[in-house]
């Protein structure tokens, strides 16, 4: 269940449920569930070139910072978001 507005402009809101596929490798532009220093976050995966280890995580809300992994940080793509479930009522 999503608990942040960091992906609001991609249509993902607080309370939305997400379905994650861990068998798919992340590609540039995918929306992913990532583990950043033991905290989960939903962001857009942005790759710099062809190196899968050279990436950053883009927030889809200008009020939230993008995440650029540093040497002392643990950042791992945990899975690809394949479906978003929204409650209408």
Image (tube, rainbow, N blue to C red):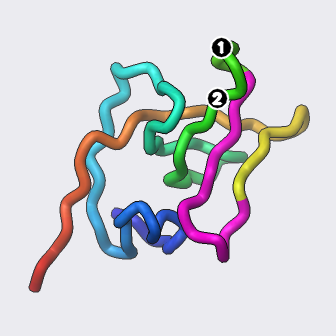
Does the magenta segment cover residue 63? Answer: yes
Lateral position of residue 41 relative to residue 71, left or right: left
Spot occupied by residue 88 in the image (x, y as percentages of width and height): 12, 79
Q: Which residue is mark 2?
A: 47
Please tell me in which quadrant of the rendered image residue 56 appears: top right
- 8 w.r.t. 44: above or below: below
**Residue at 44%, 20% in the rendered image:** 25
For label 2, the SS is strand
Q: Give 89 or 36, whichever is nearer the viewer.
A: 89
For the C terminus, the quadrant is bottom left
- 54 and 16: which is toward the camera: 54
**Quick one: label 2, few (<14), some, or many (20+) residues within 10 Å?**
some
Whether residues under marks 2 and 1 lie with C-beta atoms below 8 angstroms apart, the answer is yes
Check the image and name the residue furthest to the front. 49
Crowdedness near tag 1: few (<14), some (14–19) or many (≥20) residues, C-alpha within 10 Å: few
Image side of residue 48 versus residue 46, left or right: right
Q: Which residues are magenta?
A: 54-65
Main SS type for the magenta part?
loop
**Extreme residue toward the left, this view:** 89
Residue at mark 1:
50
User: Which part of the image, by quadrant, shows the N terminus?
Assistant: bottom left
């Amino acid at each position: 269940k999503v608990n942040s507005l960091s992906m609001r402009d991609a249509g993902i809101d607080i309370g939305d449920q997400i379905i994650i596929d861990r068998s798919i490798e992340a590609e540039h532009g995918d929306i992913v569930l990532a583990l950043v220093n033991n905290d989960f976050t939903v962001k857009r995966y942005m790759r710099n070139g062809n190196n899968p280890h050279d990436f950053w995580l883009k927030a889809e809300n200008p009020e939230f910072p993008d995440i650029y992994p540093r040497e002392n940080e643990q950042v791992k793509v945990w899975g690809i978001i394949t479906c978003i479930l929204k409650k209408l009522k």
